[in-house]
């Protein structure tokens, strides 16, 4: 009998081959360790998991899955569902390039059908059923991009090469990291977001698209060997060419008011470029050392 919506406390007792309760001379569970012999069972529940997932056109094997409890590998049943709007979902059956539609993990892209925007972009949720109840976990908004961010293409100076700057100079020394260019602005019809409150009123402000990655230069703290935000930005200038994918840190510059910010001895050290994309994925250049001399 299914008793949906309730939780049950089940006592699990361990006996040895002589039918003696393990861990007790009295035949009862040890009073000091009652929790070792009990487990709580009830309807499946979702603890967390991604609400947005970024996958790349043409790749194979990208996965999504919620973080679930009160499920097991034997009796739990799964059925993934898809929606183009985030409002009305339908079970996934025989979609090219999608596998695992009846498991806890949905996989995009196969050798025969790699990830494709027209086939795979949208919202996904999974219907999770056990003997104690059923839930819909998700939804997860999957965005397909033709750009593989935030991978780096090149850098200058190259790893292992040092950069030399003279004290007080302006613009004579710089470090550049090259990444894939930012995705162009795309025009797609706004869709209604799923309603997390269950009130039936979705967010109609428009579909959530990729936002630009963030780029920042980090300097190594000589005391800890950790890279942190540059502490003396007054002598450095960061410029970003998003269309071409070039990101440059220049040592010493002249500001818009004509004031000169020359290289100082405090600029010496190791630097890296950090790139963080929409979903928190990161990439770094290799460290480059700046040497400051008179």
Image: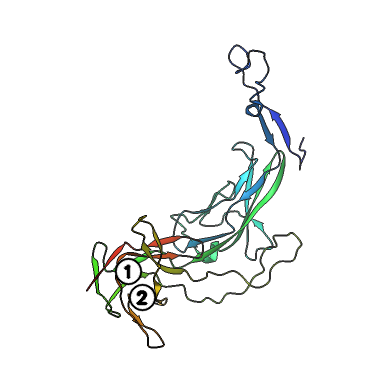
Cβ atoms under marks 2 and 1 closer than 8 Å: yes
Residue 232, horizontal then vertical, whole percent: 39, 70
Q: CA distance from mark 2 to mark 1?
A: 9 Å
Q: Of the two numbered discs 2 and 1 on the same chain, state the one appearing first in sequence.
A: 2
Left or right, 154 with respect to 113, comes to left
Q: Is residue 229 above or below residue 253?
A: above
* Towards the viewer: 87 or 70: 70
Q: Is residue 182 above or below residue 105?
A: below
Q: Secondary structure at mark 1?
A: helix
Residue 249, by quadrant, is bottom left
Task: Please tell me which residue is depicted at 68% across the width and 71% down the height of the picture.
Answer: 204
Task: Please tell me which residue is depicted at 67% across the width and 22% down the height of the picture.
Answer: 31
What's the image's color scheme? rainbow
* Towards the viewer: 87 or 16: 16
Q: Secondary structure at mark 2?
A: helix
Task: Please tell me which residue is depicted at 30% across the width and 80% down the height of the picture.
Answer: 171
* Towards the viewer: 124 or 267: 267
Q: Is residue 148 above or below residue 40?
A: below
Residue 217, by quadrant, is bottom left
The numbered disc on residue 266 is 1
Q: Nearer the viewer, mark 2 or mark 1?
A: 1
Looking at the image, which residue sits at the far left? 294
Residue 105, horizontal then vertical, whole percent: 55, 49
Q: Identify the residue position indicated by label 2 in the image.
A: 235
Task: Please tell me which residue is depicted at 71% across the width and 42% down the height of the picture.
Answer: 43
Query: In which quadrant of the rendered image does the C terminus lie?
Result: bottom left
Residue 111, horizontal then vertical, whole percent: 43, 55
Q: Is residue 149 visible?
A: no
Left or right, 162 with respect to 100, comes to left
Q: Is residue 6 visible?
A: yes
* Towards the viewer: 272 or 93: 272
Density class for disc 1 (Cα within 10 Å; few <14, some 14-19, many ≥20) is: few
């Amino acid at each position: 009998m299914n008793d949906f919506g309730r939780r049950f406390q089940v006592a699990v007792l361990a006996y040895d081959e002589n039918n003696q309760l393990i861990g007790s001379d009295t035949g009862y569970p040890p009073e000091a360790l009652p929790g070792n012999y009990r487990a709580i069972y009830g309807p499946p529940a979702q603890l967390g998991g991604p609400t947005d997932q970024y996958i790349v056109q043409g790749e194979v094997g990208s996965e999504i899955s919620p973080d679930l409890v009160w499920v097991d590998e034997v009796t739990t049943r799964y059925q993934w569902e898809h929606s183009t709007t985030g409002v009305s979902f339908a079970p996934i059956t025989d979609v090219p390039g999608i596998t695992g539609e009846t498991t806890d993990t949905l996989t995009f892209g196969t050798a025969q059908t790699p990830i494709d925007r027209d086939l795979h972009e949208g919202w996904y949720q999974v219907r999770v059923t056990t003997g104690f109840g059923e839930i819909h976990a998700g939804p997860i908004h999957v965005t397909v991009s033709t750009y593989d961010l935030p991978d780096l293409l090149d850098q200058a100076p190259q790893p292992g090469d040092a950069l030399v700057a003279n004290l007080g100079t302006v613009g004579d020394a710089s470090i550049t990291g090259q990444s894939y260019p930012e995705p162009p602005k795309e025009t797609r019809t706004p869709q209604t977001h799923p309603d997390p409150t269950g009130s039936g009123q979705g967010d109609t402000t428009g579909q959530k698209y990729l936002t630009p990655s963030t780029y920042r230069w980090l300097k190594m703290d000589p005391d800890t060997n950790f890279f942190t935000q540059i502490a003396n930005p007054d002598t450095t200038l960061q410029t970003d060419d998003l269309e071409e994918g070039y990101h440059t840190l220049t040592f010493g510059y002249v500001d818009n008011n004509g004031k000169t910010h020359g290289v100082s001895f405090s600029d010496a050290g190791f630097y890296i470029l950090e790139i963080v994309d929409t979903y928190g994925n990161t990439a770094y250049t290799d460290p480059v050392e700046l040497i400051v001399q008179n």
